[in-house]
Image (cartoon, rainbow, N blue to C red):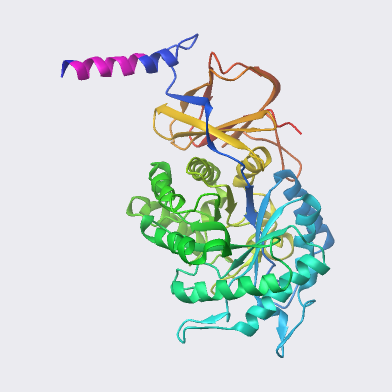
Amino acid sequence: MKNFGNLLLACMAALLGACAGESAGKCDAVVRIDADSVVNRGYIGNGVQWDPYALDYGQGRVEISDADWEKLYARLDFMRPAFIRVMTNTTSVVRDGRLDRMRGFEQLSHILGYCQSRGVTVMFGDWGGSLMDARAGTVNRTLLDHAAAYVAWLVGEKGYDCIRYYNLVNEPNGFWSAADGDFDLWAKAVSYFRGRLDAEGLAGKVELVGPDAAIWGPEEAWWVSRSRDELGDRIGLYDIHTYPSKCTVNSGEYTRILEAYRREVPAGKKIVMGEIGFKFVEPADSLLQAENLRRAAAHPNASTDDSQMFVYDPMYGTDMADALFQTIHAGYSGCIAWMLDDAMHFKEAPDKLKIWGFWNIFGDEIFGAGEERVRPWYYAWSLLCRTLRPGSDFFAADVRGAAGVKAVAAVKDGRRTVAVVNVSREPRRVRIECPGWERFRQATRYRYGEGLMRTEGDHTLLPDATGLRIDFRSGAEYDMPGESMILLTEQND
């Protein structure tokens, strides 16, 4: 017992020592970055789901104006996504048994054209409708042939070699999926489709993604291990989807769940988060879910079955940052947020939208001008796309002290970024230390949170300060209000 008491005193002394300086004893949490411990190498990048738009919301077909396309491009240019997922249905480009490549191409050309011109890596794919018959246990080889020919046309003839990955069937482990949870059926389709891609000349150009499973706990990790063992090199990139509860992420339990899937990925392969968003599924978040449903019911155009109404609140941005930081530390190589724009998908009826986006591009025209404005979490996610760049290496960032503080530290081309989020509702004074780093000499600081953001024009988040000299060797302290984030970066271009 005496030894335990001495150990406890030593730990307390170490923590207080970490807070030494002009604000000694006042810090609530200490972030210690280990410049000798890389936890994640060769990052693919962060981004968003950007699908073709519904365009018919119950009052006849509409078109996205040139002005709105330019608005979308400008907002994405500020965000600088590196990784975008685009899902379509092959059935929409097949008529009378023939592939009609130009059907719907005008809209898709805007999306893929943007990605091609900005060097964005694209995960393209088919939602899975009609690609297989789960009840009969059969795959539709004719439709898979069309799907392979279509992507070959996009990559080859149209020149969209930004398409690096193909996602065959969304969330095949789910009862809502075309595969209806049948791994063998999905694997049969993957094996056949890989052969068709190779026959179309896409070997080494377009890799297949899998298993694309939607998970809530560690129990479905066998989808990754069976993909590894039975499909081998047919899978070029592993991915899962998560819609965790707020309490699961904020408590840190999310990391344990993610690690269960990362452990099953074979050596030499990467895993990414193919979709991420929050759903209040745990009892501890029941009040949030009740409020979410209340807001959806009060909104004239919200799907009450599939909307996240807290996208209007700054809290959603800090929660997404928390989830991203844990995803990175768990060894995932990229993260795609669900989703860009409310106008892409509807659920119960054409005018009942899946509200999950950064905005609704048809706000001014149809759904109300306020819906077209960017929502707070756009700024948080944009910072994390702009500065946590492809090719980044991430370093261990241990946080001690008050709960609710998470951090990430990245280096790309010798330029460093540190981001810290406080997801608690209480203000925290946070100290950041890295004994192995030289001084930041021209750093930019951004702050995110209620009342903290300096914005300009339609979508630009301005820095809180520029040209900063920051010495993390001796430690730097920052006051962080509840539900806020601070980001310090040398990535100033």
Magenta region: 3-13
Q: Is residue 56 visible?
A: no
Q: 24 or 241: nearer the eye?
A: 241
Which residue is at a point 53% across and 74% down the rendered structure image?
A: 348
Count of marks placed on residues = 0
Q: Is residue 8 magenta?
A: yes
Q: Is residue 393 above or below residue 243?
A: above
Q: Is residue 371 left or right of residue 179?
A: right
Question: What is the chief secondary structure element of the magenta stretch?
Answer: helix
Instruction: Identify the image quadrant of residue 314.
Output: top right
Name the foreground residue: 407 vs 116. Answer: 116
Frontmost residue, 454 versus 145: 145
490 is higher (above) or lower (below) than 364: above
Measured as percent of width and height from the top left, residue 487 is found at 60, 31
Q: Residue furthest left?
A: 1
- Left or right of 284? Residue 468 is right
Q: Quadrant of residue 417?
A: top right
The N terminus lies in which quarter of the figure? top left
Q: Tell me the quarter of the image containing the C terminus.
A: top right
- Is residue 204 visible to us here? yes
Residue extending farthest to the top is 22
Q: Percent from the top left, x then y, of residue 27?
A: 44, 19
From what the image shows, is residue 240 above or below residue 489? below
Report the side of 374 relative to 216 (left or right): right
The question of residue 319 being in magenta is answered with: no
Where residue 130 sits: x, y (%)?
Answer: 58, 81
Q: Is residue 313 above or below residue 172?
A: above
**Image quarter for residue 70?**
bottom right
Q: Residue at x 73, y 73 (%)?
A: 200
